[in-house]
Amino acid sequence: MIHPSTFLSRALLADAIFSGVAALALALGAGVLAPVLSLPEALLRESGLFLIAYTALVGWLAARSSVPKALVLLVIVGNAAWTLGSVALLFSGAVSPNLLGQVFIVAQAIATGVFAELQYVGLRRSDAAVAA
């Protein structure tokens, strides 16, 4: 267990808010978004449903005064994997998004990568605070 730095708590909270908005938009609006983005409706809806559970975990971590370091690391690695997976999806040929769909995928990949970096920095600050 670690005591998260304020920076880590805020990075987790921002991730939870961003992911929660995306979860609702994707899970509830997949049918509307699919033709606009030229992405499969099932991919959007399933991503949204996954993000509901993810949002709950990250929001819970953000609200705690002490957190399991392993869970924070899992969130960081998961965000990094989501970023890489999103880029790989674009190059795989498995989907054929239009320009707006490509921008959507790249934008959320960048945001997720930024969250991974911010959380990593926050985790390092937390470790230093506990050691001192």
Image (tube, helix red, strand yellow):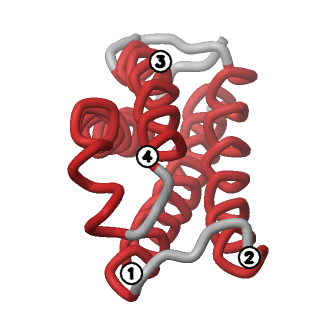
Res 75 → quadrant: top right
Above/below status of 117 relative to 120: below
- The answer to whether the residue labelled 4 contacts the one labelled 3, judged by CB atoms less than 8 Å apart, is no
- The disc label shown at residue 53, or none: 3
* CA distance separating discs 2 and 4: 17 Å
* CA distance separating discs 1 and 4: 17 Å
- The disc label shown at residue 103, or none: 1
- The disc label shown at residue 6, or none: none
Q: Reading the chain from its start, which is encountered first: label 2 or label 3? A: 3
Q: Reading the chain from its start, which is encountered first: label 1 or label 4? A: 4
Residue position for label 2 = 93
Q: Reading the chain from its start, which is encountered first: label 2 or label 4? A: 4
Give residue 41's position: percent from left, percent from top: 43, 46
Quarter of the figure with the C terminus: top right
**Within 10 Å of the Cα at label 4, are there few (<14), some (14-19), or many (20+) other Cα atoms?**
some
Q: Find numbered disc 4 in the image and state the secondary structure of the residue it sits on.
A: helix
Give residue 2's position: percent from left, percent from top: 61, 19
Res 94 → quadrant: bottom right
In the image, what residue type sits under mark 4? Glu
In the image, what residue type sits under mark 1? Val
